[in-house]
Amino acid sequence: MITNWYKSSEGMATLRAHEEDPQINPYAWPLRDEQFASWAEDDRKATYSLISDPADMVAKYSTSYCACMIYAYTGRWLTSQHGYRDANYWITILDENNFRELYSIPKDGGKFIGILKDIEADDGRGLVVWFERWKDGLVQYSTYKDHTYKVSMMPARKFHWIKIK
């Protein structure tokens, strides 16, 4: 279902609109639907049933959002030989998937994943983001944080940037 959505006319139109305005949420339907998996999930508690995307990333987390964005632009779902899923392991996950070009600063017009260097961010799971553009000397990025789509800005040096091609 998610894979087909990005290939649909609605999915492609949403991605084009998002490129013009990052406030438009490009996360795959049904994942972006606020009613989908709307309960507070905590993957550290065995009592919760976690909803995952085709890359086996937990829905409405930064990792799932970025995995979906990679799929949308490359047609490939990420895989992990080691079963790692937290953002803290994304340099390894991207390397396993042949995304190895590391940048200190992303380039406008390029597709980049940013991995926050502070691994204690986002409750110790880390944070991955999708590069949008440069704005006012800061990097504008989109991600999911606290189960909600966010567009924010931060200095580029706070992230490791890996080119997606």
Image: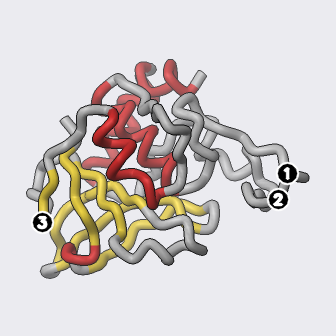
Q: Which residue is mark 1?
A: 48
Residue type for callout 2: Lys
Q: Is residue 2 above or below residue 68?
A: above
**How many C-alpha atoms fall within 10 Å of the one at disc 3: few (<14), some, or many (≥20)?**
some
| First in residue order: circle 1 vs circle 3 | 1
Q: Secondary structure at mark 1?
A: loop
Q: Position of residue 144 (x, y in %)?
A: 52, 60
Q: Is residue 128 above or below residue 135?
A: above
Question: Who is closer to the viewer here, 147 or 41?
Answer: 41
Q: Quadrant of residue 40?
A: bottom right
The quarter of the picture where the C terminus appears is top left
Residue occupying the point 81% across, 56% down: 39
Alpha carbons under labels 1 and 3: distance apart: 38 Å
In the rendered image, residue 45, in percent from the top left (x then y), is placed at 82, 59
- Asked whether the residues under the numbered discs 1 and 2 touch, taking CB atoms below 8 Å apart as contact, a structural biologist would say yes
> Which residue: 25% across, 64% down?
160
Outermost residue on the front side: it is: 82
Residue occupying image coordinates x 52% and y 33%: 55
Real-space Cα distance between discs 2 and 3? 37 Å
Read off the residue under disc 2: 45
Q: How many marks?
A: 3
**Residue of label 3:** 105
Residue type, label 1 = Tyr
The kind of residue on which mark 3 rests is Ile
Q: What is the secondary structure assignment of the residue under circle 3?
A: loop
Q: Is residue 140 rendered to the left or right of residue 25?
A: left
67 sits left or right of 95 in the view: right
In percent of width and height, residue 133 lies at 19, 62
Whole-angstrom CA distance, mark 1 to mark 2, is 6 Å
Precedes in sequence: disc 2 or disc 3:
2
Question: In the image, which is nearer the foreground, mark 2 or mark 3?
Answer: 2
Query: Residue 73: which numbered mark, if any?
Result: none
